[in-house]
Image (cartoon, rainbow, N blue to C red):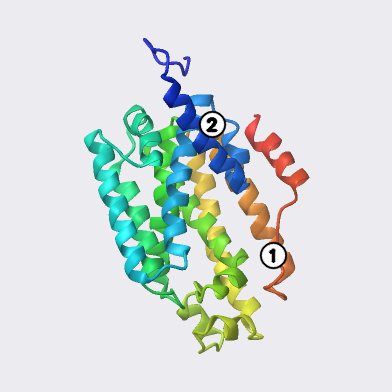
Amino acid sequence: MSDVPFGAVAERPSDAILRQTIRHRVEAAGTSFYWAMRLLPQHRRNAMYAVYAFCREVDDIADGERPVEYKIAALAAWREEIDALYAGHPRHVVAKALRKPAVRYDLCRRDFLAIIDGMEMDARADIRAPDLAMLDLYCARVASSVGHLSVQVFGDPSDAAHAVADSLGRALQLTNILRDLDEDAGRGRLYLPHEILDRHGIRETDPTAVLGHPALPAVCREVAAIAEEHFQSSIRAMESCSRRAMRPAAVMAAIYHATLSALLRSGWRDPKTRVKVSKPRKLWLVLRHGLV
């Protein structure tokens, strides 16, 4: 079946300008997300770009240098903007870009609000050594909720696809945490759970002190094992999904799993050295998992 909707009408020039603005924001970010989204038909890709742009907007608020009061107010304004989006009169340029995708792909308002809730966890106070339950909630909000929006846009709204969103979102976020230890420490944050830190004799919660502790690699390996469990859960759930629709999810999983493997090989001996997957390797993974 074609992805072109029956009775589609020509778009307004303003729609094209809006899409171009959002696309430039995504391309400028230079993320692995961009590689995977290139596999989608144009209208689905544009929808995902709008979702990504929303995530960048609220993430930039949480990670910014403004006072806490400003961040909380700005995120509250985005909650109002999501209300306006679902009432049919968005005002922000990114919310306007979400207007058609929200209707066309039946995107859930609660997922947008959950993402904002996750950003507020960062905005209210620097997260330092959360317990495992809090870390899981954080991952569910900032990553799995994005996954739930994504699978709707990909074209597989099945329970299995949403199970992929739950597990893969957590896997990706934990991989980000293990990759970005130094960057997060620079913001005063430490997402490694205190139960695992305690288990390895680390009683500190100061990010810099933890990153310099000799038991850090053991802690990171244990968190990596949790991420691996989520990756494997997502692979099992993916078997019941539309293979064609979920190609972008498969590519994201492959790229991030390669990142986790590279982190394990690095052993977290120098957290200041950022571990990356090379562009040729990413391209090979796109070809292997995205064109089958």
Tell me: 287 left or right of 91. right
Q: Give the SS element for disc 2.
A: loop
Using residue 76 as the reference point, say whether residue 264 is left or right of it: right
- The amino acid on which the numbered mark 1 sits, given as a three-letter code, is Arg
Q: Is residue 42 above or below residue 284?
A: above
As drawn, which residue projects farthest toward the right? 280
Between 62 and 156, the residue placed more toward the observer is: 62
**Residue type, mark 2 in image:** Arg
Pick whichever, 227 or 240, lies toward us: 227
Neighbor class of circle 2 (other Cα within 10 Å; few <14, some 14-19, many 20+) is some
Q: Quadrant of residue 24?
A: top right
Q: Which residue is mark 2?
A: 243
Residue 116 is situated, as x and y percent measured from the top left of the image, at 35, 55
Residue 242 visible in the shown view: no
Q: How many marks?
A: 2
Q: Nearer the viewer, mark 2 or mark 1?
A: 1
Q: Identify the image quadrant of residue 114.
A: bottom left
Q: On screen, 289 above or below 133? A: above
Residue 287 to residue 16: above or below: below
Figure quadrant of residue 153: top left
In the rendered image, residue 271, in percent from the top left (x then y), is placed at: 67, 73
Q: Along the line of sight, which residue is nearer the eye, 19 or 264? A: 19
Q: Residue at x 52, y 64 (%)?
A: 226
- Gap between marks 2 and 1 measured at Cα: 32 Å
Tell me, for residue 136, which label it has, or none. Answer: none
Which of disc 1 and disc 2 is earlier in sequence?
2
User: Which residue matches tag 1?
Assistant: 274
Q: Is residue 288 left or right of residue 94?
A: right
Identify the residue shown where x is 34% and y is 47%: 112
Residue 285 visible? The answer is yes
In the depicted view, which residue is nearer to us: 13 or 84? Answer: 13
